[in-house]
Image: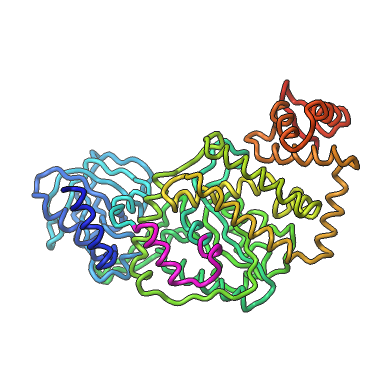
Amino acid sequence: MPCMEGEILKLLTALRGRTPLTPEKRVRDFQLKVQGIKNGEQAELEGFLLLRKPPHAPDDAVYYILSPLQPSDLQKASMVSYLILRITENSRISGSVRSGSYVRVSGFMDSYPYGTLRMLNVAELRGEDYSEYWLQYDETALSKKEFENLFMDTIYASYDFEKAFLYSLFASPRILGSNREWGEGVTFSTFKDRDRIILSIWEAVKYITGLFPRELSLRKEKRWHFVDEHLDLDFVAYLPETPVRYYSPFSRAVLKNEIPAPKWAFRYFKSKDAVFLTPKKAKILPDDPLAYLSEVPFILNEPVGYEKNRELEQLIPNVIATIFKERAKMASMSLGDRELRIFRERFEDWIMKNRMEYGEKFDALRLSGMVFETNTRFLLSTHILGSMARFEGGLKRSIISDVLVINQEILDTWMNEIPPDILMKAVKEYERYISRDRRANIALSIFMDLEATSADGSVSWEEFHSALIRYGFKRSDAAKIIERLLREGYLYEPFAGRLRMIK
């Protein structure tokens, strides 16, 4: 019977549509909880701390305000609710606490001496992670299908473009064991030297990111002022520290910049501490710095269409609850995980397949600083794999193929769009680094792929030897090739049994 009740509930939800997680609903939930606590009873509540003295505050303690709504919602909600916090020298305070922080408070309930507001005599006040605010509403999270339909009814582009955009919204788990200390951010970028195409993408992305609350926007100014007309009080609030923040260009003027962002945002871009959703008006160059660090550097030949979606606008809080719910399930992943070891092997096979198809042109795009530099592209592909895993609800082997399909579409497009003279210049640069001996050249390319996808940049002798045999070398010839590469200075052995390339 419980199973049948659950199925009936799901069916009813599907028929009437998902209920928006409005600010008003959050206020009512908070009010019901506060009203259910009698004076003198112990209570624990969560909300946003506003370091502002309430009206007519006595002088016997420090009085602040707790709101169930984040500061950006207070400015537009049709109803608000507050709890007065009374803090004394006996109150314990811990964690990161400033105006606008999400906090958990405990103590004894009372009435505020003036008006009808309730008051909590605080025994303990503890700063919490901003994500906890959204996790308390995990039951309002959207299903994968609901999430997908919302955005695909808003943006009109190729299927892979739309899906990659959705994946990017989920950011990516941190990669443990990597030689890059990246955060959870990803970069979804698009390129074309045509205003009509780039502006269409910018307008679509700007519309969607503009629906997200200020707290999730990457901004230079961390604090802002606002006025609550209900209490006729002015407040100061700070943006929370959260690993999931979003950036899209504020102005079309930056779309032609090398990195379409202000200088203060560069460090977030390079360390991947925010989700960057940005098009760029530029010629297609293989050493483009934006493409180099983009998980999905698309080149589009047609404008993107979009239309304002009333349902999406209403369900944005549910969208955010979904993102944080899936993030909590998968905060990190390790290069030593079985699925990622399988992904590494599949990625290496993908490299070999495209080397055979495109030859030196592909190898030239894998040099240091190029868009398909093997080590960086492997980690970027692992990042988008993590984003897909969050969207799909887990790291499944089936999505490994989806990552490589997106990679292939991007590679094929870049091969077709890079001007021939620029591509040949890259090939000549590549030829400066390789041996004239074809077999040694192939062996070095195989080693570069192994090295690029290894956790510490070194490759075991056995792993290299096995890879050579797998790609067609005889066992005896494989050993001789390794000895030759060591002897001629292409490789060295930093410690017994481990090999590195001399660069």
Up-down relation of residue 129 to residue 177 (above or below): below
Q: In the drawing, does residue 457 fall left or right of residue 339?
A: right
Q: How many marks?
A: 0
Tell me what residue is drawn at x 73 percent, y 26 percent: 461
Residue furthest to the bottom:
196
Q: Quadrant of the C terminus?
A: top right
Residue furthest to the top:
496
Tell me what residue is drawn at x 41 percent, y 53 percent: 240
The region drawn magenta spans 142-163
Tell me what residue is drawn at x 34 percent, y 45 percent: 127
Q: Is residue 219 visible?
A: no
Give the image location of residue 223, x and y in percent. 43, 60
Q: Who is closer to the viewer here, 223 or 434? A: 434
Principal secondary structure, stretch drawn in magenta: helix
Give the image location of residue 238, x and y in percent. 41, 57
Examine the structure image and report whether residue 131 is included in the region drawn in magenta: no
Q: How did the renderer colour the structure?
A: rainbow
Up-down relation of residue 118 to residue 395 (above or below): below
Give the image location of residue 155, x and y in percent. 49, 71
Up-down relation of residue 55 to residue 185 (above or below): below
Give the image location of residue 310, x and y in percent. 36, 74
Examine the structure image and report whether residue 145 is included in the region drawn in magenta: yes
Q: In the drawing, does residue 105 fall left or right of residue 379?
A: left
Q: In the drawing, does residue 221 fall left or right of residue 96?
A: right
Q: In the drawing, does residue 319 fall left or right of residue 371?
A: left
Q: Is residue 206 visible?
A: yes
Q: Which quadrant holds residue 344?
A: top right
Q: Who is closer to the viewer here, 243 or 488? A: 488
Tell me what residue is drawn at x 62 percent, y 43 percent: 346
